[in-house]
């Protein structure tokens, strides 16, 4: 048992760039309250670059490789083992994560494992590999499912932890970094590979649809493309050349965000940018359904609804009715939800103290 006079110790298991944003303000707030934190991070996309940009020290454990069931299982076992060894020395009271390895280690290290998700069972094996081991499952309040006694809901969205006005004010200097004029419209496209464990069997925009989309948008403004991994040769000239931690600034001033990323669609809603998403996740993620149908901040389509997607795109390009509807929805979103950072920090400390009692 830890001495009660020592600081509460929290280990953060971070495996995705969005997790950096989710936890960064919590980590700072916890340290201001006297807690001791450490970060274990997986090498995926710009995760490590973001941690460096925010001056968050970390230990790198594992990396994203060619995706198949064998490699994913091997990587998970490796991360379980490495994080367990680190936990033996750090002796965390709480492990916070959005992935399986953190809560696996919590079960064998005496820590309270807090697993956060806004995808729930829609994430497939990724969710089930984590939820069954977690001591606590936290979700936005909009999640309609009940995950049992260990399910705790917070009064906001994951994105409010980093895109709430308390945390984020978009910097108009991003336009100079992008090389666009003050009044020049631009579109930000995000294409994902759908090869992560939580994307198994899912699809988004087809390659022909992506090409058609880019050609159509070029008639209306500048087009920037961001992808997972290496950008295809045919779109090299459209690549975004800004530091990864400035992406939300670019998103905030875009005329529209389009693609097959669930994360970026939700982030667009929080910065007030219209977004269109094509994905087999349509209708299955409660938080995106609420952002779409309650607040009118985004719109989604199945890959089989490509014609409807392009019809909607043409409509949005030709009139401003959607933009007017979004202004009202954006105000309503912040009136009805909270910045969850304070809630989450208090909850982590509460669980840490209970673990010591």
Image: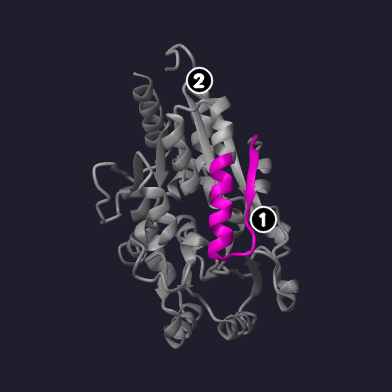
**Across the whole image, how many numbered discs are drawn on residues?**
2
- Using a 10 Å C-alpha cutoff, classify the residue at mark 1 as few (fewer than 14 neighbours), some (14 to 19) or many (20 or more): some
Judging depth in this view, the residue of 277 and 145 nearest the camera is: 145
Q: Where residue 173 sits in the image (x, y, percent)? A: 68, 53
Q: Residue at x 41, y 46 (%)?
A: 116
Q: For numbered disc 1, what is the local secondary structure?
A: helix
The mark found on residue 238 in the picture is none
Residue 111 lies, in percent from the top left, at 43, 30
As drawn, is 330 to the left or to the right of 55? left
**Residue nearest the observer in this picture, 112 or 310:** 112
Q: What residue would you read off at disc 2?
A: 34
- The x and y percentages for residue 283 are 34, 70
Residue drawn where x is 59% and y is 86% of the image: 208
| Residue wearing tag 1 | 174
Q: Which residue lies furthest to the bottom in this view?
A: 307
Where is 37 relative to 168, above or below? Answer: above
Q: Quadrant of the N terminus?
A: top left
Question: What residue span does the magenta drawing correspond to?
Answer: 57-81
Residue at image coords 38%, 42%: 134
Locate residue 256 relative to residue 345 in the image: left or right.
right
Q: Can residue 16 be seen in this view?
A: no
| Residue 326: quadrant of the picture | bottom left
Quarter of image, res 107: top left
**Residue at the image point whose x is 63% and y is 48% from the top:** 62
């Amino acid at each position: 048992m830890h001495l009660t006079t020592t600081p509460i110790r929290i280990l953060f298991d971070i495996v995705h760039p969005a997790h950096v944003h989710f936890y960064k303000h919590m980590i700072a707030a916890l340290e201001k309250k006297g807690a001791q934190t450490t970060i274990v991070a997986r090498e995926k996309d710009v995760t490590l670059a973001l941690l460096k940009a925010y001056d968050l020290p970390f230990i790198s454990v594992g990396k994203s490789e060619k995706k198949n069931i064998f490699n994913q299982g091997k990587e998970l076992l490796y991360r379980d083992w490495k994080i367990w060894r680190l936990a033996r020395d750090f002796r965390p009271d709480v492990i916070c994560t959005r992935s399986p390895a953190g809560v696996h280690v919590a079960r064998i290290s005496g820590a309270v494992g807090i697993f956060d998700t806004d995808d729930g069972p829609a994430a497939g094996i990724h969710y089930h590999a984590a939820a069954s081991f977690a001591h606590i499952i936290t979700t936005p309040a909009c999640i309609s499912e009940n995950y049992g006694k260990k399910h705790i809901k917070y009064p906001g969205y994951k994105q409010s932890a980093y895109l709430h006005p308390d945390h984020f004010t978009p910097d108009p200097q991003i336009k100079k970094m992008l090389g666009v004029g003050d009044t020049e419209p631009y579109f930000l496209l995000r294409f994902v590979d759908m090869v992560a464990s939580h994307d198994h069997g899912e699809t988004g925009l087809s390659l022909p649809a992506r090409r058609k989309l880019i050609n159509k948008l070029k008639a209306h403004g500048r087009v920037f493309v961001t992808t997972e991994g290496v950008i295809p040769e045919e779109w090299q000239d459209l690549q975004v050349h800004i530091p990864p931690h400035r992406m939300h600034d670019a998103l905030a001033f875009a005329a529209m965000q389009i693609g097959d990323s669930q994360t970026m669609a939700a982030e667009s809603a929080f910065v007030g940018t219209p977004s269109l998403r094509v994905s087999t996740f349509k209708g299955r993620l409660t938080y995106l359904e609420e952002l779409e149908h309650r607040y009118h901040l985004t719109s989604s389509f199945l890959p089989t609804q490509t014609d409807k997607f392009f019809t909607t795109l043409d409509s949005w390009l030709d009139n401003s009715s959607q933009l007017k509807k979004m202004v009202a929805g954006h105000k309503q979103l912040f009136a009805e939800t909270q910045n969850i950072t304070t809630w989450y920090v208090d909850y982590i400390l509460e669980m840490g103290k209970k673990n010591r009692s």
